[in-house]
Image (cartoon, rainbow, N blue to C red):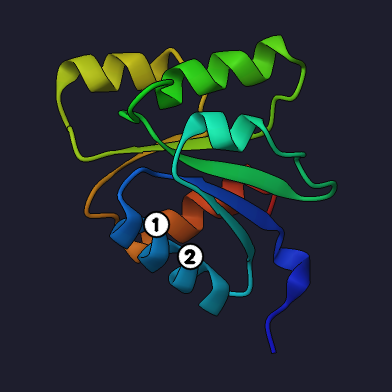
Amino acid sequence: MPDKSKGTVLVVDDDLSLLRALTRLLLQFGFDVRSFQSAEAFLSTRIPAGKVCALVDIYLPGMSGIQLCAALAAARRAIPLILMSARDDEGTKRKASQSGAVATLYKPIDEGVLLAALGRALGDK
């Protein structure tokens, strides 16, 4: 039975197959998961109380993951964010480093690296 105290992960990615795969994986590891296909859909919902973080694709259509970080901070709804991208170039790394994200992961995402980043984002030691 999953340990619900692990926290909630809000996953934002426009790639439906990746979104489903990440959701299944995180559920297997005992996280509560809410999935969104856009930053706009994410912003239209209430952020749950308790231990929560977001796993957000940088290059979303419409509002990007970087813009989502800024919008959350401006609305005083800031939560720990982990950015992810299929692009591992200098421009992406620079944008990610300036965003205030807890970590930036590059696709395909290593399961161990993902779990370590989630632990940092959710305050686990």
Instruction: Indicate the quadrant containing the N terminus: top left, top right, bottom left or bottom right.
Output: bottom right
Asked whether residue 91 is in view, the answer is yes
Percent position (x, y) of residue 83?
A: 42, 35
Q: Quadrant of residue 53?
A: top right
Mark 1 burial class by Cα count in 10 Å: few <14, some 14-19, many 20+:
some
Q: Quadrant of residue 93?
A: top left
Q: Is residue 33 above or below residue 68?
A: below
Percent position (x, y) of residue 116?
A: 49, 55
Q: Amino acid at mark 2?
A: Thr
Mark 2 burial class by Cα count in 10 Å: few <14, some 14-19, many 20+:
some
Q: Which residue is depicted at the point 35% across and 29% down?
A: 58
Q: Say whether marks 1 and 2 touch (CB < 8 Å).
A: yes
Q: Which residue is depicted at the point 60% across and 15% down?
A: 71
Percent position (x, y) of residue 35?
A: 53, 53
Asked whether residue 125 is in view, the answer is no
Q: Amino acid at mark 1?
A: Leu
Q: Is residue 115 above or below residue 51?
A: below
Instruction: Indicate the quadrant containing the C terminus: top left, top right, bottom left or bottom right.
Output: bottom right
Q: Is residue 81 above or below residue 16?
A: above
Residue at image mark 2: 23
Q: Which residue is depicted at the point 14% across and 24% down?
A: 89
Q: Quadrant of residue 98?
A: top left
Q: Residue furthest right?
A: 49
Residue at image mark 1: 19
